[in-house]
Image: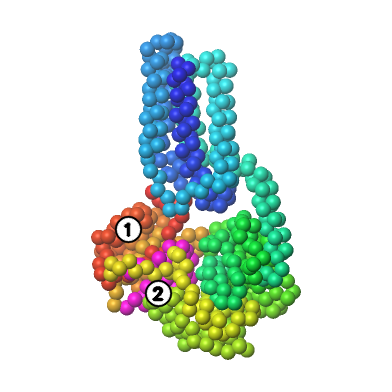
Amino acid sequence: MALNIFLFSLCWLMLCLYKLKYCLHMLQIEGYNNEKYINWINNNKDKLYPQNDKAFAGSLIAISIVFMLTLNRLKIGSGNLNYFELLTLLITAIYLIIKTKAKYESKTPLIMTKRAKRLMFISMVLVLIDYAILVGIVYLAAGDINRYFPLWAGISAVMYLLSAYYMLGANYIAKPIEKKINKKYYDLASEKIRSIKNLTSVGITGSYGKTSTKFAMSVILKEKYKVLNTPESYNTPMGISKIINDELTDEYTIFIAELGATRTGDIDEVAVLTNPKIGIITSIGPCHLETFKSIDNIMRTKYELIERLPDDGTAIFNYDNEYVKRLADKTFKEKILYGIKNTKDTHVYATDIVVGNTGSRFKLCINGTGEIECETKLLGEHNISNILAGAAAAKVLGLSLEEIALGISKIESVEHRLQLIDPGTGVIVIDDAFNSNPEGARAALDVLNSFAGKRKIIVTPGMIELGELEEEENEKFGESISHVCDIAILVGKNRTMPIFRGLKTQQFSEDNLYVVNSLNDASELLKTLTRVNDVVLFENDLPDTYNEQ
């Protein structure tokens, strides 16, 4: 009996470990944000409680019920009692083997950082405490944990199902610990960036376009300066602090940081950290509306960057964006306005734009400096806007027109942001997997539409985090797809219903409309659909927390 209990406990704890690891992954993707994690739990019951988990827990609960109903007829050491014990252990061990062999595919792997390890440890401690309490209650109530093993084994199966809440509890417990650790690294980074003489810090924020602008600007400024920029989409206090603490040295003269936010006050926190002298707002739109609740809140939050600029700082605004324009008009600090549409009122603008499917040409005009012909490999008119932001910063930092144009010619596409891929198969791929906003989606369709004479295919799960506008914007997206694409592959039946409706309102052919469960399914379908002279646009790729499988 003691051996059975030991083996069961070991198998059960291993199962909990597997489930907790999955929950930790989802929590990490949600930025360790409890509110987002709870929302994920509430919206993903099918993933938290898959059929095989329910079958396992249901089997153990059924055994415990039958055991209790026949308890009075069972004697310790009897064959019937041993049968209950062995059946419970056997089911648990078999399910552990199944779990061990099951492959969990994810787009973004779980990264076992020190924080993740702490959360895993705390959650396992919580599991062990509850397990000990369960066994203790049985012992106090009945005086015999051996005899009642099938009963509490059934209850423990329910505890296994609730593993997501142990991870939630661990995150709550760890919050003050993480806050203290984060403050230490934040303060170190803040002191370090202020201690480096002759360093100019540039902060970039916006609902979209931040990352592309950051990389474009970095390439341009490298024509004259030693530049360090935050990598990829590092835009949180801890991500930026890590780069400053680990990589920023006094050999750099320019530091460019992308400043992200999901709620009011976030930009102020990273602006205080990075101490920018130049602040850029690229755009304002309905991104993260689920947390911001309104466009006005987004505007206030983005403007926190401008409010943190010193008196001799410079604010740079995208004057084409109606919301950014409002912020620019109320700003009395030194400011530079850039744009494509409103050239009369801007300081940095582009004319004679020719957008092609391999890049773009335009004339860069800078008031008080002059104008120069430029070429870029980047796709889409919106990327010219991102380049103008970089040119505006270059103007502030004293680069010549020739240096700016040379830098523009060297800019490469950012991975997963309208990245043109030609694998040599006759099928061109446009990877815009990172994008998830209406403006960017329209820009991507414009780029796809520029491939005249080719069959156009889109693969998309739609856009997320647009709050109350999400269904409306995705339906509009479907309507736009119908005017550009020959074939549409929608990823996720439930999520893409608004896109489906938009396509149907435009009488898009059902023969050319496919709905699949995952990106892998879409890739397999493409193998049978694509032919030479096709162009495939991958528009957005949702994180694992949004998977419908």
Of residues 118 and 489, the one drawn nearer to the viewer in this rendering: 118
Residue at position x 39%, y 79% in the image: 356
Give, as a three-letter code, the residue at label 2: Val
Q: Quadrant of residue 441?
A: bottom left
Left/right placement of residue 94 relative to residue 137 reads left
Q: Quadrant of residue 316?
A: bottom right
User: Which residue lies under the disc numbered 1?
Assistant: 523
Residue at position x 52%, y 44% in the image: 24
**Which type of secondary structure does the marked residue at label 1 adopt?**
helix
Of residues 442 and 17, the one drawn nearer to the viewer in this rendering: 17
User: Which residue lies under the disc numbered 2?
Assistant: 447
* Farthest-out residue, front: 251
Classify 500 as above or below 80: below
**Which type of secondary structure does the marked residue at label 2 adopt?**
helix
Residue 331: percent from left, percent from top:
68, 76
Q: Which range is magenta? A: 427-452
